[in-house]
Image (cartoon, rainbow, N blue to C red):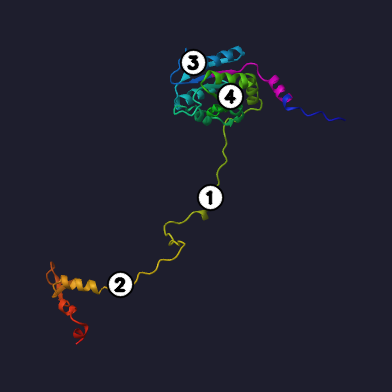
């Protein structure tokens, strides 16, 4: 009996497209500090294309280039839409903060979307395609795709990727269900041997040649200076007080003349 031929990748994708819904619920978020409903060509283009394709437009709105506003809008729309499309804020300028916000919401990134988009963009703008950080993936209950803000880039992403795969993407998202929570693997505790008791640190054992011991010093010069400062007659005996607490007991010291005399004379 002949084994049935395995299904080709193209045939499998075609079957999934046939099983995919013809209409999905989608929302459009334009990220811009300057655009209005009248000047937002990219957001209007996406909304028109979604409606023309038979999809349901849940909402279209404009938010500023602010991480809190972007996150708040996308999280809210993910509760009612199957797909959330954002446009703007995917470059490397100082106000471009869309990408890190969307990344924080994804539980299953789809790297192929950004790779395909930059591949298509390279044929149009050459090396400048690398400046786009467009990305997409699965969030909690909805797909999210962050597109650039320019109309040409949005048209490339829609016509080259999303238009034909939107229903397929939603089908893959729901056909086996998705976990509602992300379970993280606990990190095992480090063994106690890795920790050092710093309450009684051991002496440092530094490599290299040990330092030589300090040489013996001849303190006779200091003794001569002390005797000279005392006037040759008396000096302070610290630690032994006289009967008067405010004074120290004074004891005779060697006279400077005696120190200056030759050794032979001092010995005799």
Q: Quadrant of residue 240?
A: bottom left
Q: Nearer the viewer, residue 264 or 198?
A: 264
**Of the numbered discs in the image, which one, if any, rests on residue 121?**
4
Marks 3 and 4, how far apart at CA: 21 Å
Residue at the farthest left position: 244
Mark seen at residue 190 = 1
Q: Indicate which label's residue lies in the foreground, 2 or 3.
A: 2
> At 53% from the left edge and 50% from the top edge, which residue is drawn?
190
Q: CA distance from mark 2 to mark 3?
A: 87 Å
Crowding around mark 2 (Cα neighbors within 10 Å: few <14, some 14 to 19, many 20+) is few
Instruction: Name the secondary structure under disc 3.
Output: loop
Q: Which residue is mark 2?
A: 217
Q: Is residue 202 left or right of residue 79?
A: left
Mark 4: give few (<14), some (14-19) or many (20+) Cα within 10 Å. Answer: many
Where is residue 158 drawn, in percent x and y?
59, 19
Residue 130's place in the image compared with 167, above or below, is below
Image coords of residue 63 (percent x, y): 46, 20
Q: Is residue 209 above or below residue 64?
A: below
Real-space Cα separation, disc 4 to disc 1, in angstroms = 47 Å
Can residue 158 be seen here? The reply is yes
> Which residue is farthest right?
1
Span highlighted in magenta in the image: 11-27
Q: Residue at x 11, y 69 (%)?
A: 244
In front of the other: 240 or 208: 208
Residue at x-position 55% and y-position 44%: 187
Q: Is residue 112 magenta?
A: no
Residue that numbered label 3 is attached to: 40
Quarter containing the N terminus: top right
């Amino acid at each position: 009996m002949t084994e049935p031929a395995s299904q080709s990748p193209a045939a499998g994708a075609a079957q999934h497209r046939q099983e995919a819904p013809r209409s999905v619920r989608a929302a459009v978020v334009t990220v811009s500090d300057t655009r209005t409903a009248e000047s937002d060509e990219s957001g209007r283009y996406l909304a028109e294309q979604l409606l023309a394709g038979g999809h349901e437009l849940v909402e279209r709105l404009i938010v500023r280039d602010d991480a809190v506003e972007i996150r708040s809008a996308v999280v809210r729309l993910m509760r009612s839409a199957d797909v959330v499309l954002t446009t703007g804020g995917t470059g490397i300028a100082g106000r471009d903060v869309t990408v890190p916000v969307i990344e924080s919401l994804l539980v299953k990134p789809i790297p192929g979307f950004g790779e395909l988009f930059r591949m298509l963009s390279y044929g149009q703008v050459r090396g400048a395609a690398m400046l786009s950080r467009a990305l997409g993936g699965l969030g909690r209950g909805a797909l999210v795709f962050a597109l650039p803000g320019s109309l040409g880039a949005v048209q490339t992403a829609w016509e080259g990727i999303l238009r034909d795969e939107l229903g397929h993407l939603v089908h893959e998202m729901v056909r086996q269900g998705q976990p509602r929570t992300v379970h993280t693997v606990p990190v095992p505790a480090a063994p106690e041997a890795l920790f050092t008791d710093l309450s009684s640190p051991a002496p440092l054992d530094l490599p290299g040649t040990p330092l030589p011991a300090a040489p013996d010093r001849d303190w006779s010069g200091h003794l001569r200076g002390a005797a000279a400062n005392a006037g040759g007659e008396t000096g302070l005996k610290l630690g032994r007080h006289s009967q008067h607490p405010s004074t120290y007991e004074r004891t005779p010291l060697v006279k400077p003349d005696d120190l200056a005399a030759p050794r032979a004379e001092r010995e005799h």
